[in-house]
Image: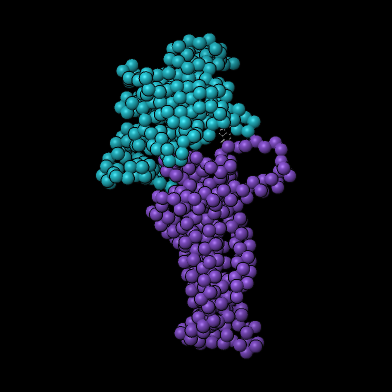
């Protein structure tokens, strides 16, 4: 669990976002976001509900188009490249959805098989099964292999959702609230998984979370999103030594039995 | 990436050209046009999702076979029964086989099959794609580098378009079987003489025009169902709406097309 020995390549920028703006009708969601992520670096993104965290990673993966600004992944502008280039880029990006988004007409095995057989057509059955089993072991759910998504608990769904993206061994992982709604023990396992993925595949990740423990453990940096901009980006200690009340409230809620934040 | 104007973003429009309703109507037409255009573009570009198309064809057949068999049979029997008195009044009961066969092959089989397919397959497409849309499964497919439009939409539209002619022929035959049984039990006509007089009056172009209609209806059902589902919004409510609109929309269009196709084909005679 020691994140100090993960090596971050300070030379290679994987994701670079400059002055990104996105609104939905009259609602300005992102209003000048800047962010740089290096190879092998994990950035935890915190922010209130509805500040556009999910929108941000959807723009990075090309699901939504930015209104203006520059979004580069591996040096390619996601909103400008051709459909084919985008498909190739997406193979390197894993996206774990906030509500799992498992294909509910398929069993767990088929859910995991789907991205694999469609993108790596040269694998034989044995290799496919091995890949499925190994990724299921990684998320700690080998026993669910023949179940349908409707038979899984929320936390199990979330982990299968992560497994489905890990199976393609992405170079970038975008986790949308990986630990929300999970018990502490599973949270620890998931945090370890995120670290393991970072270490083994040298993935860069964006981890959206409301859970400060998760942010502290998995993130090399923390970024606080507020009113369409990053209020602060930096190491965990550095960011949370801030006296900004918005940032302090996040900290107080997670780490202190602070009577001042409740009106008891 | 969505290439149509109706993507998941809600675009704010403060000014309307005419009125909200009328503008919306023309926007829908435009979106539908874009959707169909995209269908043709992606249907004819490699790679073809053969496996999924075959799977969807199987689904279409599986979902409708029992229903069209029963309805086709009943329609054939009842129609024969109802036509007998008026033909007998002219002493023309021997024309019964040709009359009912023409009616079944030319109009009833295509219409019945299309309406049943709209209710069964069209609504299913709307609901299935709609729920995949609102639970982000379509997005998930997209980020895992599978083109969801091709995999889900193109395969479904192609499947129902190709399956409809098959189903229509089948319904027609079942309907004629129903008619035969009724004729046989009343006029004691033999199997061969029934079908000989039936097929004497059916021309090749009747069958051709039925198959052509079937293709059009199949395409309509597929487009209506997939369009409604693929652009479903607003959670579970949107899924119900998509399923519902898929049926209403395709049934309405089927009748309009029936009218148009009959007019056009008649003008060639
Ligand atoms: N497709 C869309 N169409 C219209 N509005 C949208 C769309 N997606 C997101 N929004 C709006 O953008 C805002 C930000 O949404 P987003 O899902 O990014 O929030 P979030 O930061 O992820 O919140 P949470 O922590 O609750 O997940 C919300 O107000 C939402 O209503
Ligand atoms: Mg979110």
User: In the image, A145: left or right of A225?
Assistant: left
Q: Residue B257's spot in the image, x, y percent? A: 61, 63
Q: Residue B182's spot in the image, x, y percent? A: 53, 80
Which quarter of the rendering shows the C terminus of chain B? bottom right
Q: Colour of chain A?
A: cyan
Q: Is residue B175 above or below residue A33?
A: below
Q: Which residue is found at the position 58% from the left and 22% from the top?
A: A227
Q: Visible in this render: residue B126?
A: no
**Quadrant position of residue B16:** top right
Foreground of the two, A63 or A135: A63
Q: Which residue is found at the position 48% from the left and 25% from the top?
A: A17
Q: Which residue is found at the position 29% from the left and 45% from the top?
A: A122
Residue ranking furthest to the bottom: B91
How many numbered marks are there? 0
Q: Which residue is found at the position 44% from the left and 31% from the top?
A: A76
Q: Residue A259's spot in the image, x, y percent? A: 54, 13
Q: Colour of chain B?
A: purple
Q: Residue A146's spot in the image, x, y percent? A: 35, 44
Q: Is residue B147 above or below residue B81?
A: above
**Quadrant position of residue B261:** bottom right
């Amino acid at each position: 669990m020691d994140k100090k020995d993960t090596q971050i390549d300070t030379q290679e920028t994987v994701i670079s976002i400059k002055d990104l703006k996105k609104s939905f009708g009259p609602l300005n969601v992102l209003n000048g976001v800047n962010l740089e992520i290096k190879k092998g670096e994990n950035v935890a993104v915190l922010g209130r509900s509805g500040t556009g965290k999910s929108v941000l990673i959807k723009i990075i993966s090309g699901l939504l188009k930015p209104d203006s600004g520059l979004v580069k992944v591996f040096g390619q502008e996601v909103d400008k490249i051709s459909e084919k280039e985008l498909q190739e880029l997406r193979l390197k990006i894993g996206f774990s959805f906030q509500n799992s988004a498992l294909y509910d007409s398929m069993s767990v095995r088929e859910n995991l098989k789907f991205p694999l057989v469609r993108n790596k057509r040269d694998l034989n059955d044995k290799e496919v099964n091995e890949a499925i089993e190994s990724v299921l072991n990684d998320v700690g759910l080998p026993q669910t292999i023949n179940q349908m998504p409707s038979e899984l608990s929320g936390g199990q769904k979330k982990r299968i959702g992560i497994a489905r993206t890990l199976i393609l061994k992405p170079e970038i992982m975008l986790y949308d609230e990986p630990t929300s709604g999970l018990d502490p023990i599973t949270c620890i396992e998931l945090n370890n998984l995120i670290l393991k993925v970072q270490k083994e595949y040298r993935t860069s990740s964006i981890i959206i979370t409301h859970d400060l423990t998760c942010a502290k453990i998995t993130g090399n940096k923390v970024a606080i999103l507020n009113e369409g901009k990053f209020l602060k980006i930096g190491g965990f200690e550095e960011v949370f030594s801030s006296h900004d009340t918005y940032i302090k409230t996040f900290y107080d809620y997670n780490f202190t039995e602070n009577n001042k934040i409740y009106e008891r | 990436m969505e290439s149509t104007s109706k993507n998941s973003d809600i675009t704010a429009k403060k000014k309307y050209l005419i009125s909200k309703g009328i503008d919306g109507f023309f926007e829908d037409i435009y979106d539908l046009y874009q959707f169909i255009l995209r269908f043709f573009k992606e249907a004819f570009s490699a790679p073809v999702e053969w496996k999924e198309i075959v799977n969807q064809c199987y689904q279409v057949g599986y979902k409708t076979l029992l229903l069209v068999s029963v309805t086709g049979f009943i329609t054939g029997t009842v129609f024969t029964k109802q036509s007998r008195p008026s033909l007998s009044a002219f002493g023309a009961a021997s024309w019964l086989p040709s009359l009912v066969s023409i009616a079944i092959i030319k109009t009833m089989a295509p219409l019945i099959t299309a309406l049943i397919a709209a209710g069964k397959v069209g609504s299913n497409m709307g609901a299935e794609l709609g729920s995949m849309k609102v639970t982000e499964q379509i997005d998930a497919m997209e980020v895992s580098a599978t083109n969801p439009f091709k995999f889900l939409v193109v395969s479904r539209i192609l499947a129902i378009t190709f399956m409809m002619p098959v189903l229509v022929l089948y319904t027609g035959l079942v309907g004629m079987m129903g008619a035969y049984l009724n004729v046989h039990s009343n006029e004691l006509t033999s199997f061969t003489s029934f079908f000989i007089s039936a097929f004497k009056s059916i021309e090749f172009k009747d069958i051709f025009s039925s198959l052509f209609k079937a293709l059009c209806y199949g395409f309509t059902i597929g487009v209506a169902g997939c369009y409604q589902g693929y652009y479903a919004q607003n959670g579970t409510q949107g899924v119900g709406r998509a399923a519902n609109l898929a049926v209403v929309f395709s049934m309405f269009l089927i009748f309009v097309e029936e009218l148009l196709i009959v007019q056009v084909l008649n003008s060639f005679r």
